[in-house]
Amino acid sequence: MSASPQLTANSKPATAPPLANAPASSLDLAAAFRDSHVGDVLDELERELVGLAPVKSRIRDIAALLLIDRLRSNLGLSAGAPSLHMSFTGNPGTGKTTVALRMAQILHRLGYVRKGQLTAVTRDDLVGQYIGHTAPKTREVLKRAMGGVLFIDEAYYLYRPENERDYGQEAIEILLQVMENQREDLVVILAGYKNRMETFFRSNPGMSSRIAHHIEFPDYTSDELLAIAQLMLGRMQYRLSSQAENALQEYIERRKEQPHFANARSIRNALDRARLRQASRLLGRNYRDSADASVTRDDLMTLEEADIRASRVFLSPQDLAPTGDSTRPGEPAAPGRSRS
Amino acid sequence: MKLTQGTFSFLPDLTDEQIRAQVEYCLHNGWAVSIEYTDDPHPRNSYWEMFGLPMFDIRDAAGILTELHACRQTFPDYYIKVNAYDSTHRRESLRLSFIVNRPAKEPGFRLERQEGAGRTMHYTTRSYATDHPEGARYST
Protein backbone atom coordinates (compact mmCIF):
# COMPACT_ATOMS: atom_id res chain seq x y z
CA MET A 1 0.00 0.00 0.00
CA SER A 2 2.87 2.32 0.75
CA ALA A 3 4.10 1.86 -2.80
CA SER A 4 0.92 3.10 -4.41
CA PRO A 5 1.38 6.87 -4.30
CA GLN A 6 4.82 6.53 -5.72
CA LEU A 7 3.56 4.32 -8.53
CA THR A 8 0.81 6.67 -9.57
CA ALA A 9 3.21 9.58 -9.45
CA ASN A 10 5.52 7.76 -11.80
CA SER A 11 2.82 6.74 -14.21
CA LYS A 12 3.11 10.06 -16.00
CA PRO A 13 5.85 10.19 -18.61
CA ALA A 14 8.98 10.29 -16.55
CA THR A 15 10.71 13.64 -16.56
CA ALA A 16 13.93 12.52 -14.98
CA PRO A 17 16.79 12.27 -17.48
CA PRO A 18 18.17 8.76 -17.96
CA LEU A 19 21.00 8.10 -15.59
CA ALA A 20 23.68 7.67 -18.18
CA ASN A 21 26.63 7.98 -15.90
CA ALA A 22 25.11 6.10 -13.00
CA PRO A 23 27.11 3.22 -11.62
CA ALA A 24 26.23 -0.16 -13.11
CA SER A 25 24.69 -1.37 -9.90
CA SER A 26 21.79 1.09 -10.07
CA LEU A 27 18.82 0.92 -12.43
CA ASP A 28 16.40 3.50 -13.72
CA LEU A 29 13.19 2.72 -11.86
CA ALA A 30 11.11 5.14 -13.92
CA ALA A 31 12.26 3.61 -17.19
CA ALA A 32 11.60 0.12 -15.95
CA PHE A 33 8.13 1.19 -14.86
CA ARG A 34 7.43 2.73 -18.25
CA ASP A 35 8.66 -0.31 -20.15
CA SER A 36 6.55 -2.69 -18.15
CA HIS A 37 3.25 -0.93 -19.01
CA VAL A 38 2.16 -1.45 -15.43
CA GLY A 39 0.86 2.11 -15.39
CA ASP A 40 -1.53 1.39 -18.27
CA VAL A 41 -2.88 -1.65 -16.50
CA LEU A 42 -3.48 0.25 -13.29
CA ASP A 43 -5.06 3.24 -15.05
CA GLU A 44 -7.41 0.95 -16.92
CA LEU A 45 -8.36 -0.75 -13.70
CA GLU A 46 -9.09 2.60 -12.09
CA ARG A 47 -11.23 3.65 -15.03
CA GLU A 48 -13.28 0.51 -15.44
CA LEU A 49 -13.87 -0.66 -11.90
CA VAL A 50 -15.83 1.53 -9.51
CA GLY A 51 -14.94 1.49 -5.84
CA LEU A 52 -13.20 -1.69 -4.60
CA ALA A 53 -10.39 0.25 -2.93
CA PRO A 54 -8.87 -2.74 -1.06
CA VAL A 55 -8.81 -4.80 -4.25
CA LYS A 56 -7.11 -2.10 -6.25
CA SER A 57 -4.52 -1.38 -3.60
CA ARG A 58 -3.65 -5.06 -3.43
CA ILE A 59 -3.24 -5.27 -7.17
CA ARG A 60 -1.02 -2.20 -7.02
CA ASP A 61 1.14 -3.88 -4.37
CA ILE A 62 1.48 -7.00 -6.47
CA ALA A 63 2.38 -4.97 -9.54
CA ALA A 64 5.05 -3.10 -7.57
CA LEU A 65 6.50 -6.32 -6.19
CA LEU A 66 6.71 -7.98 -9.60
CA LEU A 67 8.45 -4.95 -11.02
CA ILE A 68 10.95 -4.76 -8.18
CA ASP A 69 11.56 -8.48 -8.45
CA ARG A 70 12.44 -8.08 -12.09
CA LEU A 71 14.90 -5.32 -11.23
CA ARG A 72 16.38 -7.46 -8.49
CA SER A 73 16.96 -10.35 -10.82
CA ASN A 74 18.60 -7.96 -13.30
CA LEU A 75 21.16 -7.20 -10.60
CA GLY A 76 21.60 -10.83 -9.75
CA LEU A 77 19.73 -10.65 -6.47
CA SER A 78 17.50 -13.55 -5.64
CA ALA A 79 13.94 -13.03 -6.85
CA GLY A 80 11.75 -16.02 -6.15
CA ALA A 81 8.36 -15.86 -7.76
CA PRO A 82 5.94 -14.78 -5.05
CA SER A 83 2.93 -16.96 -4.39
CA LEU A 84 -0.06 -15.26 -5.93
CA HIS A 85 -2.91 -17.63 -5.10
CA MET A 86 -5.85 -15.57 -3.98
CA SER A 87 -9.23 -15.85 -2.41
CA PHE A 88 -11.99 -13.38 -3.15
CA THR A 89 -14.71 -13.11 -0.58
CA GLY A 90 -17.67 -10.79 -0.52
CA ASN A 91 -21.39 -10.43 -0.83
CA PRO A 92 -23.27 -11.22 -4.02
CA GLY A 93 -22.69 -8.81 -6.86
CA THR A 94 -19.56 -7.15 -5.46
CA GLY A 95 -17.50 -7.92 -8.55
CA LYS A 96 -15.57 -11.05 -7.57
CA THR A 97 -15.98 -12.74 -10.92
CA THR A 98 -15.39 -9.56 -12.86
CA VAL A 99 -12.13 -8.89 -11.06
CA ALA A 100 -10.99 -12.50 -11.48
CA LEU A 101 -11.52 -12.18 -15.20
CA ARG A 102 -9.42 -9.06 -15.21
CA MET A 103 -6.79 -10.58 -12.95
CA ALA A 104 -5.68 -13.08 -15.59
CA GLN A 105 -5.15 -10.24 -18.02
CA ILE A 106 -3.37 -8.10 -15.45
CA LEU A 107 -1.00 -10.84 -14.35
CA HIS A 108 -0.24 -11.64 -17.95
CA ARG A 109 0.64 -8.05 -18.72
CA LEU A 110 2.77 -7.88 -15.60
CA GLY A 111 4.58 -10.93 -16.91
CA TYR A 112 3.72 -13.18 -14.00
CA VAL A 113 1.76 -15.78 -15.96
CA ARG A 114 2.96 -16.85 -19.38
CA LYS A 115 -0.26 -17.14 -21.37
CA GLY A 116 -2.90 -15.31 -19.36
CA GLN A 117 -5.95 -17.42 -20.16
CA LEU A 118 -8.63 -17.74 -17.51
CA THR A 119 -10.11 -21.15 -16.82
CA ALA A 120 -13.29 -20.72 -14.81
CA VAL A 121 -14.53 -23.87 -13.14
CA THR A 122 -16.95 -24.94 -10.45
CA ARG A 123 -17.24 -28.10 -8.40
CA ASP A 124 -18.73 -30.05 -11.30
CA ASP A 125 -15.61 -29.58 -13.41
CA LEU A 126 -13.26 -30.84 -10.72
CA VAL A 127 -15.07 -33.55 -8.82
CA GLY A 128 -15.99 -36.86 -10.41
CA GLN A 129 -18.97 -39.09 -9.84
CA TYR A 130 -17.35 -42.35 -8.93
CA ILE A 131 -14.12 -43.67 -7.43
CA GLY A 132 -11.12 -42.90 -9.63
CA HIS A 133 -12.96 -40.31 -11.66
CA THR A 134 -11.94 -37.25 -9.69
CA ALA A 135 -8.15 -37.29 -10.04
CA PRO A 136 -8.02 -37.39 -13.86
CA LYS A 137 -10.77 -34.82 -14.06
CA THR A 138 -9.00 -32.41 -11.73
CA ARG A 139 -5.65 -32.95 -13.45
CA GLU A 140 -7.26 -32.29 -16.81
CA VAL A 141 -8.55 -28.95 -15.59
CA LEU A 142 -5.20 -28.07 -14.03
CA LYS A 143 -3.38 -28.88 -17.26
CA ARG A 144 -5.71 -26.61 -19.18
CA ALA A 145 -5.21 -23.80 -16.68
CA MET A 146 -1.41 -23.89 -16.74
CA GLY A 147 0.18 -20.72 -17.94
CA GLY A 148 -2.85 -18.78 -16.76
CA VAL A 149 -5.33 -18.38 -13.96
CA LEU A 150 -7.62 -21.05 -12.56
CA PHE A 151 -10.76 -19.48 -11.15
CA ILE A 152 -12.84 -21.68 -8.86
CA ASP A 153 -16.19 -20.08 -8.30
CA GLU A 154 -18.09 -20.96 -5.11
CA ALA A 155 -15.11 -22.96 -3.95
CA TYR A 156 -16.76 -24.02 -0.68
CA TYR A 157 -18.87 -26.56 -2.58
CA LEU A 158 -15.66 -28.56 -3.03
CA TYR A 159 -15.81 -29.56 0.58
CA ARG A 160 -18.92 -31.31 1.83
CA PRO A 161 -18.45 -32.06 5.51
CA GLU A 162 -21.79 -33.85 5.77
CA ASN A 163 -20.59 -36.63 3.47
CA GLU A 164 -17.28 -38.10 4.53
CA ARG A 165 -16.95 -40.14 1.35
CA ASP A 166 -17.38 -37.11 -0.84
CA TYR A 167 -14.81 -36.95 -3.64
CA GLY A 168 -14.35 -33.21 -3.19
CA GLN A 169 -11.58 -33.83 -0.66
CA GLU A 170 -9.58 -35.66 -3.32
CA ALA A 171 -9.86 -32.70 -5.67
CA ILE A 172 -8.72 -30.38 -2.89
CA GLU A 173 -5.64 -32.51 -2.22
CA ILE A 174 -4.56 -32.54 -5.87
CA LEU A 175 -5.20 -28.83 -6.04
CA LEU A 176 -3.05 -28.20 -2.97
CA GLN A 177 -0.22 -30.25 -4.39
CA VAL A 178 -0.16 -28.31 -7.65
CA MET A 179 -0.60 -24.96 -5.89
CA GLU A 180 2.48 -25.75 -3.86
CA ASN A 181 4.75 -27.38 -6.44
CA GLN A 182 3.92 -25.53 -9.63
CA ARG A 183 3.50 -22.03 -8.37
CA GLU A 184 5.19 -20.58 -11.44
CA ASP A 185 2.81 -22.44 -13.76
CA LEU A 186 -0.56 -21.26 -12.55
CA VAL A 187 -2.38 -18.96 -10.20
CA VAL A 188 -5.43 -20.25 -8.37
CA ILE A 189 -8.22 -17.87 -7.37
CA LEU A 190 -10.98 -19.09 -5.09
CA ALA A 191 -14.14 -17.06 -4.83
CA GLY A 192 -17.26 -17.22 -2.76
CA TYR A 193 -19.50 -15.64 -0.20
CA LYS A 194 -17.70 -14.55 2.90
CA ASN A 195 -19.05 -16.67 5.73
CA ARG A 196 -19.16 -19.87 3.71
CA MET A 197 -15.58 -19.35 2.56
CA GLU A 198 -14.54 -18.89 6.16
CA THR A 199 -16.09 -22.22 7.06
CA PHE A 200 -14.33 -23.77 4.08
CA PHE A 201 -10.94 -22.42 5.13
CA ARG A 202 -11.48 -23.44 8.73
CA SER A 203 -11.99 -27.04 7.68
CA ASN A 204 -9.12 -26.88 5.15
CA PRO A 205 -6.30 -25.04 6.94
CA GLY A 206 -3.81 -26.25 4.34
CA MET A 207 -5.73 -24.39 1.67
CA SER A 208 -5.94 -21.23 3.71
CA SER A 209 -2.22 -21.12 4.41
CA ARG A 210 -1.28 -21.66 0.78
CA ILE A 211 -3.26 -18.65 -0.28
CA ALA A 212 -1.19 -15.54 0.14
CA HIS A 213 -3.85 -12.99 -0.64
CA HIS A 214 -7.20 -13.04 1.08
CA ILE A 215 -9.01 -10.15 -0.52
CA GLU A 216 -12.35 -8.99 0.77
CA PHE A 217 -14.77 -7.23 -1.54
CA PRO A 218 -16.68 -4.53 0.32
CA ASP A 219 -20.31 -3.67 -0.44
CA TYR A 220 -20.78 -0.70 -2.73
CA THR A 221 -22.03 2.63 -1.43
CA SER A 222 -25.05 4.26 -3.08
CA ASP A 223 -22.85 6.66 -4.99
CA GLU A 224 -20.68 3.87 -6.30
CA LEU A 225 -23.76 1.94 -7.39
CA LEU A 226 -24.97 4.98 -9.30
CA ALA A 227 -21.56 5.30 -10.94
CA ILE A 228 -21.73 1.63 -11.86
CA ALA A 229 -25.17 2.16 -13.38
CA GLN A 230 -23.82 5.03 -15.46
CA LEU A 231 -20.91 2.88 -16.59
CA MET A 232 -23.22 0.02 -17.58
CA LEU A 233 -25.55 2.35 -19.45
CA GLY A 234 -22.63 3.97 -21.21
CA ARG A 235 -21.47 0.57 -22.37
CA MET A 236 -24.97 -0.23 -23.67
CA GLN A 237 -25.22 3.25 -25.26
CA TYR A 238 -28.11 4.43 -23.15
CA ARG A 239 -28.32 7.47 -20.94
CA LEU A 240 -30.52 8.73 -18.12
CA SER A 241 -32.48 11.95 -18.23
CA SER A 242 -31.70 14.12 -15.22
CA GLN A 243 -35.02 13.24 -13.54
CA ALA A 244 -34.37 9.61 -14.22
CA GLU A 245 -31.01 9.92 -12.54
CA ASN A 246 -32.66 11.24 -9.40
CA ALA A 247 -35.22 8.46 -9.59
CA LEU A 248 -32.46 5.90 -9.91
CA GLN A 249 -30.68 7.33 -6.90
CA GLU A 250 -33.87 6.99 -4.91
CA TYR A 251 -34.38 3.52 -6.31
CA ILE A 252 -30.94 2.46 -5.09
CA GLU A 253 -31.60 3.80 -1.58
CA ARG A 254 -34.86 1.90 -1.36
CA ARG A 255 -33.62 -1.25 -3.00
CA LYS A 256 -30.70 -1.51 -0.55
CA GLU A 257 -33.11 -1.82 2.34
CA GLN A 258 -34.95 -4.72 0.77
CA PRO A 259 -34.04 -8.40 1.01
CA HIS A 260 -32.02 -10.17 -1.68
CA PHE A 261 -30.05 -7.09 -2.55
CA ALA A 262 -27.16 -8.16 -4.74
CA ASN A 263 -25.18 -4.94 -5.25
CA ALA A 264 -24.17 -4.38 -8.86
CA ARG A 265 -26.18 -7.34 -10.07
CA SER A 266 -29.41 -5.82 -8.72
CA ILE A 267 -28.56 -2.61 -10.50
CA ARG A 268 -27.98 -4.43 -13.75
CA ASN A 269 -31.33 -6.18 -13.43
CA ALA A 270 -33.08 -2.91 -12.64
CA LEU A 271 -31.57 -1.31 -15.72
CA ASP A 272 -32.60 -4.26 -17.86
CA ARG A 273 -36.17 -3.89 -16.68
CA ALA A 274 -36.05 -0.15 -17.27
CA ARG A 275 -35.00 -0.87 -20.84
CA LEU A 276 -38.02 -3.15 -21.23
CA ARG A 277 -40.32 -0.42 -19.98
CA GLN A 278 -38.70 2.15 -22.20
CA ALA A 279 -39.24 -0.08 -25.20
CA SER A 280 -42.93 -0.59 -24.56
CA ARG A 281 -43.36 3.09 -23.71
CA LEU A 282 -41.99 4.07 -27.10
CA LEU A 283 -44.02 1.43 -28.88
CA GLY A 284 -47.23 2.25 -26.99
CA ARG A 285 -46.97 5.92 -27.79
CA ASN A 286 -46.76 5.18 -31.47
CA TYR A 287 -49.72 2.80 -31.43
CA ARG A 288 -51.97 5.42 -29.87
CA ASP A 289 -50.93 8.27 -32.02
CA SER A 290 -50.01 7.24 -35.52
CA ALA A 291 -49.38 10.85 -36.51
CA ASP A 292 -46.33 10.82 -34.23
CA ALA A 293 -44.99 7.53 -35.44
CA SER A 294 -41.35 8.48 -35.50
CA VAL A 295 -38.71 8.09 -32.82
CA THR A 296 -35.52 10.04 -32.72
CA ARG A 297 -32.11 8.74 -31.89
CA ASP A 298 -32.46 10.60 -28.62
CA ASP A 299 -35.69 8.78 -27.76
CA LEU A 300 -34.04 5.46 -28.36
CA MET A 301 -31.13 6.30 -26.11
CA THR A 302 -32.82 7.98 -23.18
CA LEU A 303 -34.33 6.29 -20.17
CA GLU A 304 -37.00 8.55 -18.64
CA GLU A 305 -38.03 8.96 -15.07
CA ALA A 306 -41.21 6.96 -15.65
CA ASP A 307 -39.18 3.93 -16.74
CA ILE A 308 -37.49 3.88 -13.34
CA ARG A 309 -40.45 5.01 -11.23
CA ALA A 310 -42.64 2.18 -12.48
CA SER A 311 -40.55 -0.23 -10.42
CA ARG A 312 -42.26 -2.10 -7.61
CA VAL A 313 -39.57 -0.80 -5.28
CA PHE A 314 -41.34 2.56 -5.26
CA LEU A 315 -44.66 1.09 -4.11
CA SER A 316 -45.36 1.59 -0.44
CA PRO A 317 -46.28 -1.46 1.64
CA GLN A 318 -49.88 -0.20 1.85
CA ASP A 319 -50.13 -0.22 -1.91
CA LEU A 320 -49.00 -3.78 -2.04
CA ALA A 321 -51.04 -5.28 0.77
CA PRO A 322 -54.64 -5.02 -0.51
CA THR A 323 -53.90 -6.26 -4.00
CA GLY A 324 -54.04 -9.77 -2.67
CA ASP A 325 -51.15 -11.14 -4.67
CA SER A 326 -48.49 -13.25 -3.06
CA THR A 327 -46.19 -10.35 -2.23
CA ARG A 328 -46.44 -9.08 1.32
CA PRO A 329 -44.33 -6.29 2.75
CA GLY A 330 -40.94 -7.41 3.93
CA GLU A 331 -41.12 -10.62 2.01
CA PRO A 332 -39.47 -11.39 -1.29
CA ALA A 333 -41.66 -11.56 -4.34
CA ALA A 334 -42.69 -15.11 -4.97
CA PRO A 335 -41.55 -15.71 -8.55
CA GLY A 336 -37.76 -15.79 -8.31
CA ARG A 337 -36.22 -12.46 -7.58
CA SER A 338 -38.19 -10.33 -9.98
CA ARG A 339 -38.79 -7.18 -8.06
CA SER A 340 -39.86 -4.94 -10.84
CA MET B 1 22.11 -49.14 -30.40
CA LYS B 2 20.36 -45.81 -30.14
CA LEU B 3 16.92 -45.87 -31.73
CA THR B 4 16.69 -43.24 -34.46
CA GLN B 5 13.06 -42.57 -35.20
CA GLY B 6 11.34 -39.24 -35.59
CA THR B 7 12.71 -35.72 -35.52
CA PHE B 8 15.92 -34.88 -33.61
CA SER B 9 16.77 -38.57 -33.26
CA PHE B 10 20.36 -38.16 -34.44
CA LEU B 11 20.96 -35.46 -31.84
CA PRO B 12 21.74 -36.14 -28.21
CA ASP B 13 18.59 -36.68 -26.16
CA LEU B 14 16.68 -33.45 -25.58
CA THR B 15 16.72 -31.96 -22.12
CA ASP B 16 13.44 -31.05 -20.45
CA GLU B 17 14.09 -27.40 -21.26
CA GLN B 18 14.52 -28.23 -24.93
CA ILE B 19 11.40 -30.41 -24.91
CA ARG B 20 9.49 -27.54 -23.35
CA ALA B 21 10.67 -25.19 -26.07
CA GLN B 22 9.64 -27.62 -28.81
CA VAL B 23 6.22 -28.17 -27.26
CA GLU B 24 5.82 -24.43 -26.89
CA TYR B 25 6.50 -24.12 -30.62
CA CYS B 26 3.86 -26.78 -31.38
CA LEU B 27 1.25 -25.07 -29.21
CA HIS B 28 2.11 -21.74 -30.76
CA ASN B 29 1.21 -23.22 -34.14
CA GLY B 30 -2.05 -24.58 -32.80
CA TRP B 31 -1.08 -28.24 -33.05
CA ALA B 32 -2.53 -30.74 -30.62
CA VAL B 33 0.17 -32.50 -28.65
CA SER B 34 -0.14 -36.10 -27.52
CA ILE B 35 2.10 -38.54 -25.71
CA GLU B 36 2.62 -42.17 -26.74
CA TYR B 37 4.75 -45.01 -25.42
CA THR B 38 5.79 -48.46 -26.54
CA ASP B 39 8.23 -51.26 -25.87
CA ASP B 40 8.15 -52.54 -29.43
CA PRO B 41 10.56 -50.27 -31.28
CA HIS B 42 10.24 -51.84 -34.76
CA PRO B 43 10.42 -49.00 -37.29
CA ARG B 44 7.17 -50.09 -38.93
CA ASN B 45 5.28 -50.18 -35.63
CA SER B 46 3.21 -47.05 -36.06
CA TYR B 47 0.73 -47.96 -33.35
CA TRP B 48 2.24 -46.88 -30.07
CA GLU B 49 0.02 -46.83 -27.00
CA MET B 50 -1.58 -43.49 -26.18
CA PHE B 51 -0.84 -42.06 -22.76
CA GLY B 52 -4.12 -40.28 -22.21
CA LEU B 53 -5.98 -38.52 -24.96
CA PRO B 54 -4.44 -35.98 -27.31
CA MET B 55 -4.41 -32.65 -25.49
CA PHE B 56 -6.39 -30.32 -27.67
CA ASP B 57 -7.07 -27.40 -25.37
CA ILE B 58 -3.76 -26.82 -23.64
CA ARG B 59 -2.32 -23.33 -23.79
CA ASP B 60 1.01 -23.77 -22.07
CA ALA B 61 3.78 -26.35 -22.31
CA ALA B 62 3.70 -26.82 -18.54
CA GLY B 63 0.55 -28.93 -18.90
CA ILE B 64 2.21 -31.26 -21.42
CA LEU B 65 5.37 -31.51 -19.34
CA THR B 66 3.31 -32.50 -16.32
CA GLU B 67 1.75 -35.29 -18.34
CA LEU B 68 5.15 -36.33 -19.68
CA HIS B 69 6.56 -36.61 -16.16
CA ALA B 70 3.59 -38.74 -15.20
CA CYS B 71 4.21 -40.99 -18.22
CA ARG B 72 7.91 -41.32 -17.41
CA GLN B 73 7.07 -42.27 -13.88
CA THR B 74 4.66 -44.97 -15.03
CA PHE B 75 6.86 -46.27 -17.89
CA PRO B 76 10.46 -45.42 -17.03
CA ASP B 77 11.91 -48.12 -19.28
CA TYR B 78 9.79 -47.55 -22.36
CA TYR B 79 10.16 -45.46 -25.45
CA ILE B 80 8.04 -42.33 -25.11
CA LYS B 81 7.39 -39.87 -27.90
CA VAL B 82 5.66 -36.55 -28.21
CA ASN B 83 3.49 -36.04 -31.27
CA ALA B 84 2.09 -32.79 -32.60
CA TYR B 85 -0.99 -33.11 -34.76
CA ASP B 86 -2.09 -30.37 -37.12
CA SER B 87 -5.86 -30.40 -37.52
CA THR B 88 -5.94 -27.74 -40.25
CA HIS B 89 -8.28 -28.68 -43.06
CA ARG B 90 -6.45 -30.72 -45.74
CA ARG B 91 -3.39 -31.08 -43.52
CA GLU B 92 -4.83 -33.31 -40.80
CA SER B 93 -1.64 -35.15 -40.04
CA LEU B 94 1.33 -35.20 -37.71
CA ARG B 95 3.68 -32.29 -38.09
CA LEU B 96 6.28 -33.22 -35.53
CA SER B 97 7.12 -36.35 -33.59
CA PHE B 98 10.14 -36.93 -31.42
CA ILE B 99 11.35 -39.39 -28.82
CA VAL B 100 11.62 -38.00 -25.30
CA ASN B 101 12.40 -41.10 -23.28
CA ARG B 102 14.23 -44.33 -24.01
CA PRO B 103 15.18 -47.45 -22.06
CA ALA B 104 18.55 -47.48 -20.34
CA LYS B 105 19.76 -50.34 -22.51
CA GLU B 106 18.77 -50.63 -26.16
CA PRO B 107 19.87 -53.97 -27.59
CA GLY B 108 19.03 -53.02 -31.17
CA PHE B 109 17.91 -55.13 -34.13
CA ARG B 110 18.93 -58.36 -35.77
CA LEU B 111 18.90 -58.81 -39.53
CA GLU B 112 17.09 -61.96 -40.64
CA ARG B 113 17.55 -63.59 -44.00
CA GLN B 114 15.07 -65.91 -45.57
CA GLU B 115 15.77 -67.89 -48.69
CA GLY B 116 12.83 -67.87 -51.08
CA ALA B 117 12.03 -69.60 -54.34
CA GLY B 118 14.76 -69.40 -56.96
CA ARG B 119 17.41 -68.57 -54.35
CA THR B 120 15.89 -65.08 -53.82
CA MET B 121 16.70 -63.54 -50.46
CA HIS B 122 14.15 -61.81 -48.19
CA TYR B 123 15.50 -59.57 -45.52
CA THR B 124 13.77 -58.38 -42.41
CA THR B 125 14.76 -56.86 -39.08
CA ARG B 126 13.62 -57.94 -35.70
CA SER B 127 14.18 -56.23 -32.37
CA TYR B 128 16.08 -58.29 -29.83
CA ALA B 129 13.80 -56.79 -27.19
CA THR B 130 10.68 -58.40 -28.68
CA ASP B 131 12.04 -61.86 -27.87
CA HIS B 132 10.52 -61.22 -24.45
CA PRO B 133 6.81 -60.76 -23.88
CA GLU B 134 5.29 -57.31 -23.70
CA GLY B 135 6.06 -55.53 -20.45
CA ALA B 136 9.18 -57.60 -19.74
CA ARG B 137 11.29 -56.32 -22.60
CA TYR B 138 13.40 -53.60 -21.11
CA SER B 139 13.04 -53.98 -17.35
CA THR B 140 16.47 -54.90 -16.05
Image (cartoon, rainbow, N blue to C red):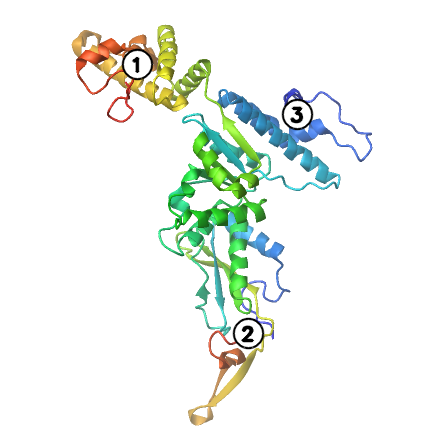
Amino acid, disc 1: Val
> What residue is pinned by disc 3?
A3
Gap between marks 3 and 2, in whole Å? Answer: 58 Å
Considering every residue shown, the one lying at the far bottom of the view is B118
Helix, strand or loop status at disc 2: loop
Residue A313's disc is 1
Give the crowd class for mark 1: few <14, some 14-19, many >=20 residues within 10 Å. some
Give the side of residue A67 with respect to residue A299, left or right.
right
- Mark 2–mark 1 contact, CB under 8 Å? no
Q: Considering depth in this image, is A170 or B73 the residue closer to the camera? A: A170
Indicate the position of residue A330 as horizontal and vertical percent values: 29, 17
Give the residue displayed 66% in from the left and 24% down from the top: A2
Q: Determine the chain carrying the residue at label 3.
A: A
User: In the picture, residue A333 is in which quadrant?
Assistant: top left
**Which of the marked residues, 3 or 1, is nearer the chain's N terminus?**
3
Q: Is residue A334 above or below residue B83?
A: above
Give the side of residue A150 with respect to residue A64, left or right.
left
The answer as to whether the residues below labels 3 and 2 share one chain is no
Give the crowd class for mark 2: few <14, some 14-19, many >=20 residues within 10 Å. few
Indicate the position of residue A73 as horizontal and vertical percent values: 71, 40
- Mark 3–mark 2 contact, CB under 8 Å? no
Gap between marks 3 and 1, in whole Å? Answer: 44 Å
> What residue is pinned by disc 2?
B139
For the question of whether residue A148 can be seen, the reply is no
Q: Determine the chain carrying the residue at label 2.
A: B
For the question of whether residue A173 can be seen, the reply is yes
Give the crowd class for mark 3: few <14, some 14-19, many >=20 residues within 10 Å. some
Give the residue displayed 57% in from the left and 29% down from the top: A59
Indicate the position of residue A297 as horizontal and vertical percent values: 33, 13
